[in-house]
Amino acid sequence: MRPILLKGHERPLTFLKYNRDGDLLFSCAKDHTPTVWYANNGERLGTYRGHNGAVWCCDVSRDTTRLITGSADQSVKLWDCETGVQLHSFNFDSPARAVSFAEGDKLVVITTDPFMEQQSAIHVKNIEGDRSKQNSDSVLTITGPQGRINRVLWGPLNKTLISAGEDGTIRIWDAETGKCLKESDPDTGHQKVITSMSKSADGSHFITGSHDKSAKLWDTRTLTLLKTYVTERPVNAAAISPLLDHVVIGGGQEASQVTMSDRRAGKFEAKFFHKIFEEEIGGVKGHFGPINALAFNPDGRSFVSGGEDGYVRLHHFDADYFHIKM
Amino acid sequence: MADVAVAPEAPHRLMTPDVMEPPRINLNIDWSQVDLDSVVLPPGEDCGIKSDDEEEEEEVLETDTGFGNVIVVDNLPIVAIEKFDKLEGVIRKIFGQIGVICEDGLWMPKDENGKTKGYAFIEYNTPQEAQTAREQTNGYKLDRSHVFVVNMFDDFDKYMKVPDEWVPPESKPYTPGENLLAWLTDERGRDQFVVRFGAETEVYWNDARQGKPDPVYHRTFWTESFVQWSPLGTYLATIHRQGAAVWGGEKTFNRLMRYIHPQVKLIDFSPGEKFMVTYSSHEPSNPRDTQRVTLNVFDVRSGKVLREFKGSADDFATGGTGGVAGVSWPVFRWGGGREDKYFARIGKNAISVYETETMGLLDKKSLKVDNVLDFSWSPTEPLLSLFVPEGGGGNQPARVSLVSIPSREELRQKNLFSVSDCKMYWQSSGEYLAVKVDRYTKTKKSTYTGFELFRIKERDIPIEVLELENKNDKIVAFAWEPKGHRFAIIHGDGPRPDITFYSMRSPNNVGRVTKLTTLKGKQANALYWSPIGRFCVLAGLKAYNGQLEFYNVDELETMATAEHFMATDVDWDPTGRFVSTSVTSVHQMENGFNIWSFNGKLLYRLSRDRFFQFLWRPRPPTLLTAEDEMEIAKNLRKYSKKYEVEDADALNAMSTQDIEHHRKLINEWKDWLSQWKNLYEEEAEQRMELRDGEPSDEEEDYEAEEVEVEEIINIEEEVVGYGFEQVD
C-alpha cells in the first residue's frame, strides 16, 4: 500500500471529510485555507480563501454543493463547493470548533469555544436554499457543558444532537428544546478529553477517540457503550469503515513532546481494529507527527490520514486487505 | 516497689490537658442536621482508612505513653529529710552526666515522715538518653549495699503483669503450615513473575501457550516502595514504613512474617533464605554529622532480630579508605553458598566476617588487610577474593588474593602493577574467577584493560592473563556463562562495539583460554546469559533504544534479532525458556513488558502505565543430578512427545474457544444491528421528507447516470496566417 502524499497545507491538519460520492476530499488545517482534492489521485482541485485563522472542522452537503467550515477566526463560513465563493459568514464572539450539516442540509450545528467571558455553546442555524435569504439567526443555542466541545453530530431524524469534548463526557441533546437527554456513564466512558467523533455509514453507531488512549463505540440512540479499543497512545482521530467491520484509530504522543524523543517513540500509526472483536489488525505508519484526522472513503476502499506534520496521506487498500481473516 | 503501681504525680510537662483532649476542629457544620447514613462512600475505596491488618502494626509501635524518657532508679539509700538535698545532688551528678535531666525532672517520693522511699524517677529530654542511662547505670554501685536497679518507666507495666505463679505455657496443637513450594508443582511447569505498576502489584503465571499471562494474585498498595523475591522463590518481600513483610503460600499470598524495622529502605536475603538483612538510614540531628544507619539481621522464619548493627554511614561505607562510595548495597555479602554460614562486610583496613551460628565475628576478630578496597565471595564455597590497591606511593604493588574461610589461609595471591581499578567476576558455580584489571599506560594518561583468570578448582589455582587484541578497547560488559566455562565481553571504543566469546577450555584439553568468535560492530551494551547457559541475549539498552539479539553460543549463530523499543531491562526466567524485556517508568512512554521465547520469538506483550518492576520468581536448584540431566537431554525426543501432544490439544481447544467467542460476539452485534435496522426502516419516510423527497437512503438505490455536459468556456477568434511566408 503506497500512500499518495497530498502536500498543500503548511500547518498541522485538523480535519478531513469526503463528500458523499467519495470523489472529493476536503481538508482543514491550521493554515487558513481549507482545500479540496480529487479523492482518487490526490490532485489538488482548489482552495477556499477567506478565513483568517486555523480551520478546525468542515462539513459538506449531501449533494456536494455547499461546504461549511468553522474557524478560530470566530467565524463559520458557507462556501459554494464548486466555485469557492463565500456564500455566507456566521460570526461569533469566540472560535468555532465543530460544524455539522443535518439530514437534508437545511440545518447546521456549530459549536463555539469558551473564550474570554464566553461559555462554550452549541448553535443551530438555518441554511436557506436561496442564498439571498440566508441569515445568521440561531434556531437554538445550548450553553452549559463545561469546557470546549470538540465534536458535534446530529442524531437520527435530526431529533437529537450528540456532543463530546474536553470533559470526556458524551451528551445527547434534544434538538428542538435543547434539553440534555443523556450523558455517558463516567465510569465506563472516557476519562480524558474526547478529541474526535464520527458516525458509521448508516448512523447507527459512532466512534469517539480520547486522550485516555482509547476509542469507544456507542449506540447513537441509547448512548450504550458497545465496544472499547485500547491503544498505547492518546487518540486524536477515529473513523469507522463503511465496508468492513473495521475501525481505524490514530493519534500519538502529544505534539509538544515529539521533539524530545525518537521518531519511533511517538507511534504515529493509524491502527486498524476489528470493530466487533476489539482486536488489533494492523497499523499504517508514515507520519512524522501525531495523526490529527482520519476519514474513510465512503466506498471503504481507501482512507486518508492527516498529521501534525502537515501532510495528508491517501491510502488505497491493497487487495489482501479485503481478505483479512480474523 | 509495689506502690509504684499508683501513678506518681510525676512532673510531667507532656500531659497538659489540651494534649489529653484534642481540640475539636470547628467546621461550621451542624452535626445534628447531618444524616450520616446518607453519606455514600465510593465503592472499593478505603478513603485512606487503614485495614485492621495495618493498624495492628501501629499499635505495637505506639506503646509510647509519653513516659518513654522516664527511668526509675531503685535501691537508693533511704534517707531522712535532712539528707534529702545531698542525695538529690549525688543522683543529679550521676544521671546528669548521661543526658540532660528535665527541669523538675527528678522526683523522689517521700513517706509521711519525710523519709525517702528508696527510689526515684528521672525524666530526660529524649527517650534515647533515658535508654542509655538505663543501660549505663543499671547495676551502678553507689556503695556496697546500694546497687542501682534502673528500669524504663514504660517497662513497669510489663513487669507488673507478670503473674506470681509460673504457669506452664499452653502447648498449642500443631497446625501444619502452608506448602510454600506449591507453585513449583504447577502441572504445566510454568513460571511465575511479579509486576508492579502504579499502585498495583500483580503476580502472574507466564502462560506462553495462551500467549498471555494468567493472573494469580493482585493487590493494590501491597508495598510502599518495592517488592523482592527471596533467592529460592519461597517468599515475596514487601517494604513498608514499619518494616518488611514476606508473603507466600499455596493459592493466595498470605502474610507469613513481619520484620519490624521502621523506615526500612533496603532488604537483602541470604542465598539460602535463612536470614534477611534490613537497612535504614536516618538523618542526623546535626547536619554536619554523617547519616546514621541501622542494619538488622532477621531470622526469616521466626522474624526475630538476631543481630543489630548501628553506626554512622561512614563505618559502613565500602572501600575501606573511607568516604569513597558511601554505603553500597548490600553492606553484608553472604558467603559459603546456600548454607548461609558466613556474611562479611568491608571496613577500614579489615574485612569483618561473621558467623551465622553465633551472629558474632568469626574467631572474634576481623580479617586484617591493609587498604583493602573490595572483596567478593565465591558463590559456592567459603572463599573470599579481595583486592588491595597499590600502596606506599607505588612501592607496594596492588594485589588480588584468595582467602579461605574459616582458616584465613591465603590460597593464592597475584601482584599487579600500575593498576587503576579492579573488578572481580565469579562464575556461578565458583569454578573460575575473572578479575578485570585497568592499568595505566606508561604515560599514566590513559588506561587499558586486561583480565586475570583464576581456575579455582585446579591444583595450585593457575592464573592466566587475557589481553584483548586491541588494547585500547574499552570494556563495556563482561559476563560468565552460568554453570559453564564460557564468557563474553563487549569491548570497543566507538558506538558499535565488538562482542567476543571465550572458553576456558581448549580443543586439546591443555586448559588454556581460547577465543570462540568475535561479532563485529554490534549495537549492544549488555549481556544476558540464559541461566542454563548456551544462549545469550546481546542487548542494546538505553542509548541503543532496545536492540536485542538472541545468540546461540554452541552453534555460534544468531537465532533472531528483534527490538523492544526503549527497553530498560532484560531478564531470563529461571528455567531459561523465556526472556522478558521491560520498559520501566524511567521513560514516560512505552511502559510495559514483552515476553520472548529463548530463541527470540515475541510471545506476548502487555503495556502498563507507570511500570516499575518485573521480577521472575526464582526456583530452587534442580533436584536432578548431573547424570539425570544428561540422560534427559539425550532422550529429549522421548520426553518431549508427551508435551507436544498436550500442546497441540491445548492449542486446538483454544482455537475452538476463540472461534466460539468470535461467533458469539458477531451474533450479538447482528442482533443489535437488526434492532437498529427495524427502527431505521420505520423512519425511512420521515427521513425522505427531511431531504425534500430525495429517496436514496441506501447505496443500492443509487443509480449512476452518465450525463455528458458540453460547456463552452470561451470563444475566441484568431487570424491564422498562411504559414508559407516563413519558408524562405
Image (spheres, helix red, strand yellow):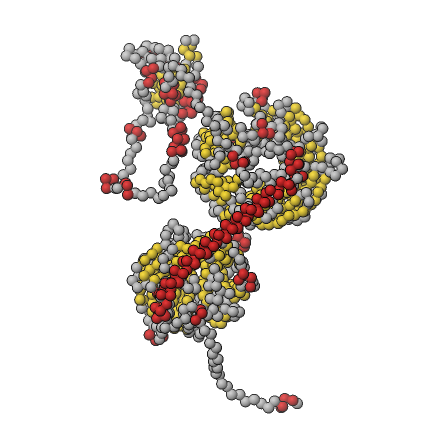
Query: Would you identify the image quadrant in which residue A127 lies?
Result: bottom left
> Could one spot residue B252 in this view of the protein?
yes
Q: Which residue is located at x 62 percent, y 25 percent?
A: B405
How far from the left and from the top, in percent, is residue B625? 64, 32
How far from the left and from the top, in percent, is residue A273? 49, 56
Task: Decide if residue B408 is on the left or right side of residue B77.
Answer: right
Task: Decide if residue B314 is on the left or right side of residue A209.
Answer: right
Task: Decide if residue B527 is on the left or right side of residue B132.
Answer: right
Q: Which residue is located at x 41 percent, y 11 percent?
A: B146
User: Height in image: B306 above or below B37?
Assistant: above
Q: Which residue is located at x 71 percent, y 42 percent?
A: B516
Q: Quadrant of the N terminus of chain A?
A: bottom right
How far from the left and from the top, in percent, is residue B597? 59, 45
Count of number-bearing discs: 0
How far from the left and from the top, in percent, is residue B505? 71, 37
User: Height in image: A26 above or below B429?
Assistant: below
Viewer-nearest residue: B727 or B393? B727
Task: Decide if residue A193 is on the left or right side of residue B22.
Answer: right
> Could one spot residue B84 in this view of the protein?
no
Viewer-nearest residue: B314 or A219? A219
Query: Would you identify the image quadrant in which residue B42 lies?
Result: top left
Q: Which residue is located at x 42 percent, y 17 percent?
A: B168
Query: Would you identify the image quadrant in which residue B677 lies?
Result: bottom left
Viewer-nearest residue: B378 or B542? B378
Viewer-nearest residue: A163 or A54? A163
